[in-house]
Image: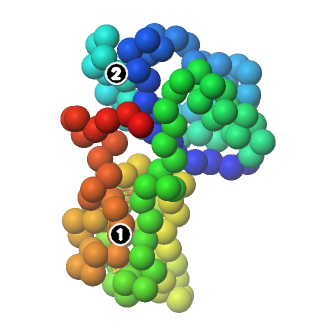
Amino acid sequence: MKSENVLLIFRSNIMYKPLIYRLSKDFDIIFNILEAKILPRREGRILLELRGEEDQLLKGVTFLEENRVVVEHLSDKVWREEDLCVHCGACTGLCPTGALSLVRPKMEVVFDVNKCVACGMCGLACPFGAMKDITLFDPFAEGRTVN
Ligand code: SF4
Ligand code: SF4
């Protein structure tokens, strides 16, 4: 079982189709809606956690893309610059999902992108600018265009 967080962008012509429902029905994918924003008759954006077998996740994402949903993988959008991180731990208390956590006894801060919801808190907290491009990637920013 694998999990990943994705941002789905629906243009107005497909936003009322039950495509997310088909993920669970046809591909056995468990989904968890993390955040959503609907602009009626214009666009819908949904941040989803997807869980399932790797091949089914791949098929499910392909199905969405074939139906003209723009799928952005958070793992492509946010990352940690390992050379800049000094494992100070300043970000761990702010991370709401546990994507950044302190591992004892090595006292290392690990980053699990699959738990990240791109809230941007760590980007603000990190004194070394190690969390990329979390403060720049706002999934729900007005005016962000669909590719
Ligand atoms: S705040 Fe920055 S430097 Fe400190 S552990 Fe987090 S990512 Fe690393
Ligand atoms: S953006 Fe940073 S603080 Fe927010 S969930 Fe992701 S790792 Fe945690």
Give the tally of numbered discs: 2
Q: Residue at x 42, y 59 (%)?
A: 78
- Image x and y of residue 67, in percent: 59, 21
Q: Residue at x 43, y 12 (%)?
A: 13
Q: Which residue is mark 1?
A: 131
SS class, disc 2:
strand
What amino acid is labelled 2 in the image? Glu
Residue 91, label in figure: none
What amino acid is labelled 1 in the image? Met
Q: Is residue 108 visible?
A: yes
Q: Is mark 1 within 8 Å of ligand 1?
A: yes
Q: Residue at x 32, y 35 (%)?
A: 145
Q: Residues within 10 Å of mark 1 (few under 14, many from 20)?
A: many
Q: Nearer the viewer, mark 2 or mark 1?
A: 2
Q: Residue at x 70, y 19 (%)?
A: 25
Task: Please indicate whether residue 55 sits to the left or right of residue 87 in the image.
Answer: right
Residue 43, label in figure: 2
Task: Please indicate whether residue 124 sits to the left or right of residue 133 in the image.
Answer: left
Colour logic: rainbow
- Image x and y of residue 107, in percent: 47, 86
